[in-house]
Amino acid sequence: MQETGSAQTRATVVWFVVAAAVGLVSALLHLLRSEVWGSHDALPLTVLAFATTAFAALLVYRGVLVAAEEQDAVRRSPSGGVARRPVR
């Protein structure tokens, strides 16, 4: 198999950066709920903390899918370069 180099485009990087930012917010919400930062046990805070965790996981999953699509496009392209995906 031929090594094609890095196939990451801006779309892949954006998905992972947004996922990291949402994950950071989620971690801060979980810390706010914990005994470390005051042990707030309000139900809306708990729901929000777990919802942002789930959202961050979905963003990471979508980022992996975008990266896989881009790698497949590179393998299919005759030049071996980054193939452009059509705008959806």
Image (tube, grey):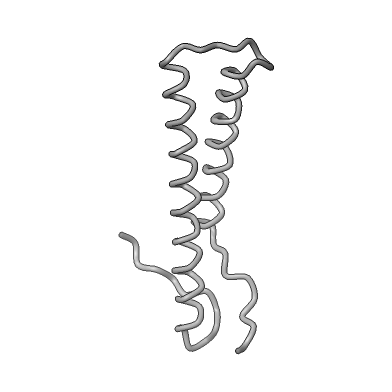
Task: Classify 51 as above or below 38.
Answer: below
Q: Where does the N terminus fall, quadrant-wise? A: bottom right
Q: Where does the C terminus fall, quadrant-wise? A: bottom left
Q: For this rendering, which residue is in front, 11 or 41?
A: 41
| Quadrant assignment, res 3 | bottom right
| Residue drawn at the location 49% of the way across and 26% of the way down | 49
| Residue drawn at the location 55% of the way across and 11% of the way down | 40
Q: Position of residue 71 (x, y in %)?
A: 51, 73
Q: For this rendering, which residue is in front, 52 or 74?
A: 52
Q: Position of residue 19 (x, y in %)?
A: 53, 43
Task: Classify 17 as above or below 86.
Answer: above
Residue extending furthest toward the left: 88
Q: Position of residue 47 (x, y in %)?
A: 42, 24
Residue extending furthest toward the right: 36
Q: In the visual, does 25 lie left or right of 69?
A: right
| Residue drawn at the location 65% of the way across and 15% of the way down | 35
Q: In the visual, does 55 lie left or right of 30?
A: left
Q: Position of residue 80 (x, y in %)?
A: 55, 83
Q: Exactly how many numbered labels are in the figure?
A: 0
| Residue drawn at the location 46% of the way across and 32% of the way down | 52
Task: Classify 14 as above or below 83.
Answer: above
Q: For this rendering, which residue is in front, 78 or 29?
A: 29
